[in-house]
Amino acid sequence: MTRRTLIILLIVSGGLNLFLVGIIAASVIVHWSRSEIGRDPGPRRAFRLYRAVDNLDEPHRARARATLKKMHPEIRAKIEVIRAARRALRKQLRDNAVSPEAVEAGFRSLQQARSETQAAFHALVRQIAETLSPEQRRRFYREAYRSGGRKRKWRRNGEGGRRE
Protein backbone atom coordinates (compact mmCIF):
# COMPACT_ATOMS: atom_id res chain seq x y z
CA MET A 1 0.00 0.00 0.00
CA THR A 2 1.17 3.42 -0.79
CA ARG A 3 1.43 6.22 1.70
CA ARG A 4 -1.46 8.05 0.02
CA THR A 5 -3.80 5.03 0.36
CA LEU A 6 -2.98 4.75 4.07
CA ILE A 7 -3.74 8.44 4.63
CA ILE A 8 -7.09 8.10 2.81
CA LEU A 9 -7.99 5.00 4.87
CA LEU A 10 -7.01 6.81 8.07
CA ILE A 11 -9.23 9.78 7.19
CA VAL A 12 -12.19 7.52 6.26
CA SER A 13 -11.73 5.50 9.46
CA GLY A 14 -11.59 8.67 11.56
CA GLY A 15 -14.74 9.99 9.88
CA LEU A 16 -16.65 6.76 10.55
CA ASN A 17 -15.49 6.75 14.17
CA LEU A 18 -16.66 10.36 14.63
CA PHE A 19 -19.99 9.45 13.04
CA LEU A 20 -20.51 6.54 15.45
CA VAL A 21 -19.44 8.63 18.46
CA GLY A 22 -21.97 11.29 17.40
CA ILE A 23 -24.79 8.77 17.16
CA ILE A 24 -23.97 7.30 20.57
CA ALA A 25 -23.65 10.73 22.18
CA ALA A 26 -26.97 11.85 20.68
CA SER A 27 -28.78 8.77 21.95
CA VAL A 28 -27.32 9.25 25.45
CA ILE A 29 -28.33 12.92 25.50
CA VAL A 30 -31.85 12.07 24.34
CA HIS A 31 -32.10 9.31 26.96
CA TRP A 32 -30.96 11.60 29.79
CA SER A 33 -33.11 14.55 28.84
CA ARG A 34 -36.25 12.54 28.07
CA SER A 35 -39.13 13.75 30.19
CA GLU A 36 -41.71 11.41 31.61
CA ILE A 37 -44.63 13.52 30.48
CA GLY A 38 -45.41 11.38 27.47
CA ARG A 39 -45.33 8.05 29.26
CA ASP A 40 -48.69 8.37 30.95
CA PRO A 41 -52.13 8.84 29.37
CA GLY A 42 -53.00 11.71 31.71
CA PRO A 43 -50.62 14.40 30.46
CA ARG A 44 -51.26 13.48 26.83
CA ARG A 45 -54.90 14.22 27.49
CA ALA A 46 -53.78 17.63 28.72
CA PHE A 47 -52.21 18.37 25.35
CA ARG A 48 -55.46 17.35 23.64
CA LEU A 49 -57.29 19.64 26.02
CA TYR A 50 -55.10 22.58 24.98
CA ARG A 51 -55.75 21.74 21.32
CA ALA A 52 -59.48 21.59 21.98
CA VAL A 53 -59.34 24.99 23.68
CA ASP A 54 -57.44 26.44 20.72
CA ASN A 55 -60.26 25.31 18.40
CA LEU A 56 -62.93 27.24 20.33
CA ASP A 57 -64.38 30.56 19.16
CA GLU A 58 -62.66 33.67 20.47
CA PRO A 59 -64.73 34.77 23.48
CA HIS A 60 -64.89 31.19 24.77
CA ARG A 61 -61.21 30.58 23.99
CA ALA A 62 -60.11 33.49 26.17
CA ARG A 63 -62.22 32.28 29.11
CA ALA A 64 -61.02 28.70 28.70
CA ARG A 65 -57.37 29.81 28.55
CA ALA A 66 -57.88 31.85 31.72
CA THR A 67 -59.34 28.76 33.41
CA LEU A 68 -56.43 26.64 32.22
CA LYS A 69 -53.94 29.22 33.45
CA LYS A 70 -55.66 29.37 36.84
CA MET A 71 -55.64 25.57 37.22
CA HIS A 72 -52.13 25.05 35.77
CA PRO A 73 -50.21 24.94 39.09
CA GLU A 74 -52.64 22.43 40.57
CA ILE A 75 -52.52 20.16 37.51
CA ARG A 76 -48.72 20.49 37.35
CA ALA A 77 -48.46 19.49 41.01
CA LYS A 78 -50.66 16.44 40.42
CA ILE A 79 -48.53 15.36 37.46
CA GLU A 80 -45.44 15.74 39.65
CA VAL A 81 -47.08 13.49 42.26
CA ILE A 82 -47.54 10.84 39.54
CA ARG A 83 -43.88 11.15 38.57
CA ALA A 84 -42.75 10.85 42.18
CA ALA A 85 -44.94 7.79 42.73
CA ARG A 86 -43.59 6.22 39.53
CA ARG A 87 -39.99 6.92 40.56
CA ALA A 88 -40.59 5.41 44.01
CA LEU A 89 -42.18 2.33 42.46
CA ARG A 90 -39.30 1.87 40.04
CA LYS A 91 -36.84 2.16 42.92
CA GLN A 92 -38.77 -0.44 44.89
CA LEU A 93 -38.86 -2.80 41.91
CA ARG A 94 -35.12 -2.36 41.28
CA ASP A 95 -34.32 -3.31 44.88
CA ASN A 96 -34.63 -7.07 45.00
CA ALA A 97 -35.02 -7.15 48.80
CA VAL A 98 -38.47 -5.50 48.71
CA SER A 99 -41.48 -7.20 50.20
CA PRO A 100 -44.54 -7.83 48.02
CA GLU A 101 -46.63 -5.65 50.37
CA ALA A 102 -44.36 -2.65 49.73
CA VAL A 103 -44.58 -3.16 45.97
CA GLU A 104 -48.36 -3.45 46.23
CA ALA A 105 -48.46 -0.22 48.24
CA GLY A 106 -46.36 1.46 45.55
CA PHE A 107 -48.77 0.33 42.83
CA ARG A 108 -51.71 1.58 44.91
CA SER A 109 -50.12 5.00 45.46
CA LEU A 110 -49.40 5.30 41.73
CA GLN A 111 -52.99 4.34 40.89
CA GLN A 112 -54.34 6.83 43.43
CA ALA A 113 -52.18 9.64 42.03
CA ARG A 114 -53.32 8.83 38.49
CA SER A 115 -57.00 8.73 39.46
CA GLU A 116 -56.74 12.06 41.33
CA THR A 117 -55.08 13.68 38.32
CA GLN A 118 -57.67 12.24 35.97
CA ALA A 119 -60.49 13.52 38.18
CA ALA A 120 -58.92 16.99 38.18
CA PHE A 121 -58.68 16.93 34.38
CA HIS A 122 -62.31 15.85 34.04
CA ALA A 123 -63.42 18.59 36.42
CA LEU A 124 -61.44 21.11 34.39
CA VAL A 125 -63.03 19.92 31.16
CA ARG A 126 -66.50 20.13 32.70
CA GLN A 127 -65.75 23.62 34.01
CA ILE A 128 -64.71 24.80 30.54
CA ALA A 129 -67.65 23.06 28.83
CA GLU A 130 -70.26 24.66 31.11
CA THR A 131 -69.81 28.01 29.37
CA LEU A 132 -70.25 26.63 25.82
CA SER A 133 -73.34 26.21 23.69
CA PRO A 134 -74.52 22.62 23.08
CA GLU A 135 -72.93 22.43 19.61
CA GLN A 136 -69.64 23.92 20.79
CA ARG A 137 -69.70 21.63 23.82
CA ARG A 138 -70.13 18.61 21.55
CA ARG A 139 -67.17 19.68 19.38
CA PHE A 140 -65.09 20.49 22.46
CA TYR A 141 -65.74 17.08 24.05
CA ARG A 142 -65.03 15.32 20.76
CA GLU A 143 -61.67 17.09 20.44
CA ALA A 144 -60.68 16.79 24.11
CA TYR A 145 -61.54 13.10 24.37
CA ARG A 146 -60.73 11.85 20.91
CA SER A 147 -58.98 8.50 20.80
CA GLY A 148 -55.21 8.41 20.87
CA GLY A 149 -54.80 6.41 17.71
CA ARG A 150 -56.43 4.07 15.33
CA LYS A 151 -57.60 0.85 16.80
CA ARG A 152 -57.48 -2.19 14.61
CA LYS A 153 -60.92 -3.47 13.89
CA TRP A 154 -61.61 -7.05 13.07
CA ARG A 155 -62.82 -7.20 9.51
CA ARG A 156 -65.00 -9.81 7.94
CA ASN A 157 -63.95 -10.92 4.45
CA GLY A 158 -62.13 -7.63 3.87
CA GLU A 159 -65.36 -5.69 4.27
CA GLY A 160 -65.88 -2.78 6.61
CA GLY A 161 -68.17 -4.58 9.06
CA ARG A 162 -67.12 -5.85 12.44
CA ARG A 163 -67.37 -9.43 13.57
CA GLU A 164 -69.96 -10.14 16.16
Image (tube, grey):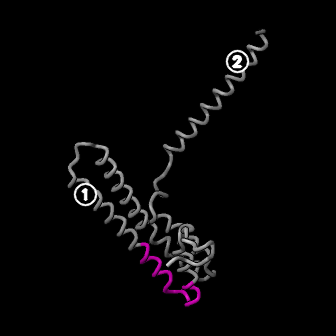
Q: Residue at x 77, y 14 (%)?
A: 5
Residue 10 image label: 2
**Of callouts 1 and 2, which one flags the residue occurring earlier in the amino acid sequence?**
2
**Is disc 1 placed on a helix, strand or loop?**
helix
Which of 150 and 45 lies nearest the eye of the viewer? Answer: 150
Q: Which residues are magenta?
A: 121-138
Q: Position of residue 151 (x, y in %)?
A: 54, 68
Q: Position of residue 52 (x, y in %)?
A: 57, 75
Q: Position of residue 117 (x, y in %)?
A: 39, 68
**Dominant secondary structure, magenta:** helix
The outermost residue toward the front is 157
Report the residue marked by disc 1: 104
Question: Dividing the picture into quarters, in which one does residue 115 lie?
Answer: bottom left
* Residue 131 drawn in magenta: yes
Label 2: few (<14), some or many (≥20) within 10 Å?
A: few
Amino acid under disc 1: Glu
Q: Position of residue 97 (x, y in %)?
A: 22, 43
Q: In this rendering, is residue 29 above or below 67?
A: above
